[in-house]
Amino acid sequence: MGRLQGKVAMVTGAGTGIGRACMVRFALEGATVFGVSRTQANLDETLKLVTQAGGQGAVYAADLSDPEAAERAVEACAGQCGRIDILLNAAGVGYNLRETSLGSMDPVDTTPVDKWREVMALNLDSLFYVTRIALRHMKAQRSGSIVNVASIFGLGGAPDAHTYTATKGAIINLTRSMSVAYVDDNIRCNVVAPGFVETRMVESVIPMLFSPDNPKLISPMGRPATCDEVAYACLFLASDEASYCTGTVLTVDGGSTARA
């Protein structure tokens, strides 16, 4: 029996990267998975991986930065699956956004106001819109597990991408606040904070940060994480194995934050 047997897991950002890895891993552990992302083609590929692995799931395309679309997505999950036991919030943008949205990953003084709002909407507002509706279902059933994907850059400073780092810091403290607020409803709220991960979000900077000349510049392990490695951390916090974990921030960074 899998660690999520009989559970229903809603996964945002399920079309690629960490979200996709979590959806597949959760399905392999017995959950019925419901994946949400903006691009239908990416979601279809994720669902194909789920079904090929013998899992059960469904997908729903939505722009979660639209509060009405986010509500429809959550209600679709609850309607199709009957309940929501796990919410894994992995939707968001990263460094690769700067390639199509000039100034979005800049320091504060050169970040245009519209780019600040863009990244806030995609990384933070979307999480809020989804979570507030999912919490209604979890409170009604008096159980639930919420895992939010943040970043080690929510724990410390960075020379650029200041809107991004602000969203990740906000996700961490919002999760901590929720863990206190909803503990009596038997709802656990935790954070996974990855370092650099092999995803499209950071593929342009990986060769520089983990170069053969200095592979341990960022991580003592000398390499980025895989999406599966992050998914296993999310699985632990989502599962009943982490029954005494709420308000926890689990770093998956190859030792980056441990080094002075």
Image (cartoon, grey):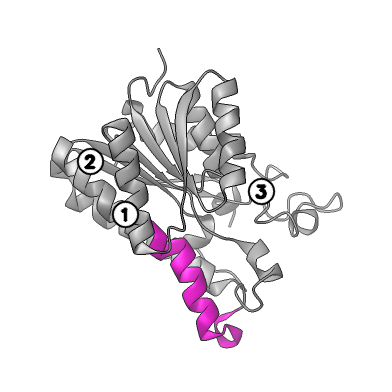
| Magenta residue span | 107-127
Q: Is residue 86 depicted above or below 257 in this figure? A: above
Q: Quadrant of the N terminus?
A: top left
Percent x, y of residue 83 = 26, 34
Which residue is painted at 55% across and 82% down in the image? Answer: 108
Disc 1 element: helix
- How many badges with numbers are in the image? 3
Q: Earlier in the sequence, mark 2 or mark 3?
A: 2
**How many angstroms separate mark 3 from mark 1 (CA)?**
28 Å
Q: Is residue 14 depicted above or below 161 in this figure? A: above
Disc 3 element: loop
Q: Which mark is on residue 199? A: 3
In this rendered view, identify the residue nearer to me: 7 or 64.
Answer: 64
* Extreme residue in the top direction: 1
**How many angstroms separate mark 2 from mark 3 (CA)?**
30 Å
Q: Nearer the viewer, mark 2 or mark 1?
A: 1
Q: Which residue is mark 2?
A: 187
Q: Which residue is mark 1?
A: 71
Going by the numbered disc 3, the residue's amino acid type is: Thr
Disc 2 element: strand
Q: Is residue 16 visible?
A: no
Percent x, y of residue 255 = 59, 46
**How many angstroms separate mark 2 from mark 1 (CA)?**
20 Å
Going by the numbered disc 2, the residue's amino acid type is: Ile
Q: Quadrant of the C terminus?
A: bottom right
Image quadrant assignment for residue 205:
bottom right
Q: Nearer the viewer, mark 3 or mark 1?
A: 1
Which residue is painted at 52% across and 43% down in the image? Answer: 14
Going by the numbered disc 1, the residue's amino acid type is: Glu
Image quadrant assignment for residue 82:
top left
Q: Earlier in the sequence, mark 2 or mark 1?
A: 1
Q: Is residue 130 depicted above or below 43 in this figure? A: below
